[in-house]
Image (spheres, rainbow, N blue to C red):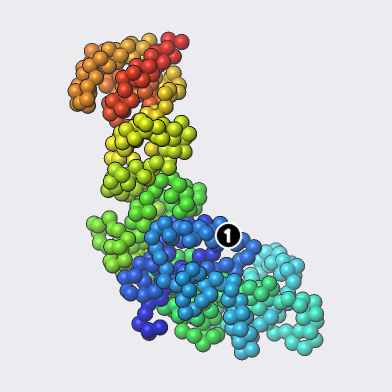
Amino acid sequence: MSENTIRVRYAPSPTGYQHIGGVRTALFNYLFARATGGKFILRIEDTDQERFTKDALEDIYTTFSWLGMDWDEGPDKEGPFAPYFQSQRTELYKKHIMDLVDRGEAYYCYCSSERLEAMREEQQKTKKGSGYDRRCRELSGVELEKAKAENPNPVVRLKIPLNGETSFDDILLGSVKRKNTDINPDPVILKSDGFPTYHLANVVDDHTMEITHILRAQEWVPSVPIHVILYKAFGWEPPKFCHLPMVMGKDGQKLSKRHGSTSLRDFKTEGYLKEAILNYIALLGWSFDDTREFFTLAELEKLFTIDKLNKSASTFDYKKLEWFNGQYIRQKSKDEVKNLILPYLKEDEKVAAVIDSDKGGEILDGVISLVHERLKLLKDVLPLTRFLFVDEVDFETEELIPKKMDALAAIKICEKIKELFGRFSDSDEENEAFFRAAADELGVKLGDLLQPLRVAITGSKVSPPLFESLGLLGMEKCIKRLNKAIDQLKA
C-alpha cells in the first residue's frame, strides 16, 4: 500500500440491525475515503458468538447495498488483508497474544467466575476499589501451578501500567489524557473460549489491515487509552483518531428506540427514500456551509472534509427527515413515484385487486396526481387514498358533525351538498367558489361545510385535496356515500 493512501473501516457487530448512528459512522468513513481517493473497508466484528445472528449479518449487506455505499475490501470483496470476519482470524489474535505474554505485557488469569462475582459484591459492599484486583498478575511457583490445575481454560489480561497517564490526539477533540489508575484494571483481551475481546481484535485488525484513520462515535473515547496501551505494548504506531459527535434525541439523551424508529430497515419500511436518509444523516455533525442543505451521494463524495465536522452532539429530528423525504419524493418522476408507492398500496388485498383490474391504471394515475406534491412518507399513501379503490368506507357518525353543531345541522349541510353536486365541474376554483357561497348561505364556515363531506367520502377528517378526490371518485359513488352519511346521522 502507498504510504499516502488513506484507509478507513466500518466494523459493525452482527448482533442487531443497522441503526442511524452506525450508518452515520459508516457514511462519514465512506465519504472520507471517496473524497481523498482512499480505501473503505468493511470488517465484520463477530467475536461475540452468543449474540451473533445471520439476520443481523444479512442486514449489514442489504442496508449498504440499498444506500449505494460500496466497500473496496470486505467479506464479499476479498482484498490483501483477508479474511474480513474476525471469527476467521482467531489464530492471528492468539499469535499476537502469545507475543504479549512472552514479553510480559499480558498474563493468564485463572480466576473463576464465582471468585470474580464475590470480588465485585465485596467492592460494592465496602465501596473500595472497582474492576479486577490483579490477583493473577504476579502469580508464580506453587500458587501458579495450583491455579492452572483449578482452571485449565484461563483468560488473558492486558497489563495496564500502575502509574502515570496515557494520552492520545484526536482530530476533533484535541489532546485527551487519562490517568492509568482511572483505567479499567487489566481488561481481558482473550476469553476462555479462545475468542479475543473487542479491544484486542480491534487493535490487531486495524494495525494488520493498515488502517490510517479511525472515525467512530464519541462513546468509544473511554476505550481509547486501553487501545493506546495495546499499541505501545506491541510497539506499533496507532492510527489517527477522530471521534464523531453523538446523535441525540430531542430530550438530549442518546438516540434510541424510545425516540422512535432507529433501524434502517424500519425507516425503509415506513417509506423513507435512501436519498433523504443519506442527505439528512450527512448533516448530523457535518456541514458544507451555513446555507446549503441538499446533496446527492456523488456530491458528498467530492465535498466531504474532516475539518467541517462539528464537535458538539447532533439532534435527530424526525420531522426534519420527513421534510427531506417529501422534498425528494417531489423530485421523482410520476413513473418513479408509481413504482415506489405500488408495494404499499398492494398490501391491501382489495386495493391490489382494483389496481390489477382494467380501471386500475386510470385510478393509479389519479392517485399519483393527488399525492405527488403532498406525500411525506410512502407508507401514508394507502390510508390517504384507499377510499378511491373501495366501494364503501366506514366512519364514525360523530366525525360527520362539526364542532358546536348537532346531527340535524350536519344533515342540513349534507342535503345542501347533494344539491351542489349537480353543479360540480372540472375546475377546482369554480367548485370552491360555489361551495363557499353555500357555506355563506347556511351561515357556516367553509371548513365546517366540508367536514361531513370529507368524512363521508374518504372515511377520515384528513384527506388529499377534496375536490380532486371527488372528481376521481365519480359522482355516483359520492352521492351513495353522502346518502350513507345522512342515514347514519338520522339514525
Residue 42: give x, y in percent of width and height: 47, 69
Residue 221: give x, y in percent of width and height: 48, 70
Residue pictured at 23% horizontal, 13% vertical = 441
Residue pictured at 28% horizontal, 62% vertical = 299
Q: Nearer the viewer, residue 445 or 490?
A: 490
Q: Nearer the viewer, residue 309 or 416?
A: 416
Q: Nearer the viewer, residue 132 or 4?
A: 4
Residue 122: give x, y in percent of width and height: 71, 66
Residue type at mark 1: give it: Lys
- SS state under label 1: helix
Residue pictured at 52% horizontal, 68% vertical = 44
Q: Which residue in the structure is indicated by mark 1? A: 54
Which residue is the extreme one toward the front? 358
Q: Would residue 436 be found to the left or right of residue 453 on screen?
A: left
Q: Is residue 447 visible?
A: yes
Q: Is 430 situated above or below 318? A: above
Q: Is 127 situated above or below 237? A: above
Q: Would residue 356 be found to the left or right of residue 163 on screen?
A: left
Quadrant holding the N terminus: bottom left
Q: How many marks?
A: 1
Q: Is 269 situated above or below 138? A: above
Q: Quadrant of residue 312?
A: bottom left
Residue pictured at 46% horizontal, 31% vertical = 350
Q: Is residue 280 visible?
A: no
Q: Would residue 465 be found to the left or right of residue 170 on screen?
A: left
Q: Would residue 369 be found to the left or right of residue 379 on screen?
A: left
Residue 327: give x, y in percent of width and height: 29, 47
Mark 1 Cα within 10 Å, few/some/many (few <14, many 20+)? few
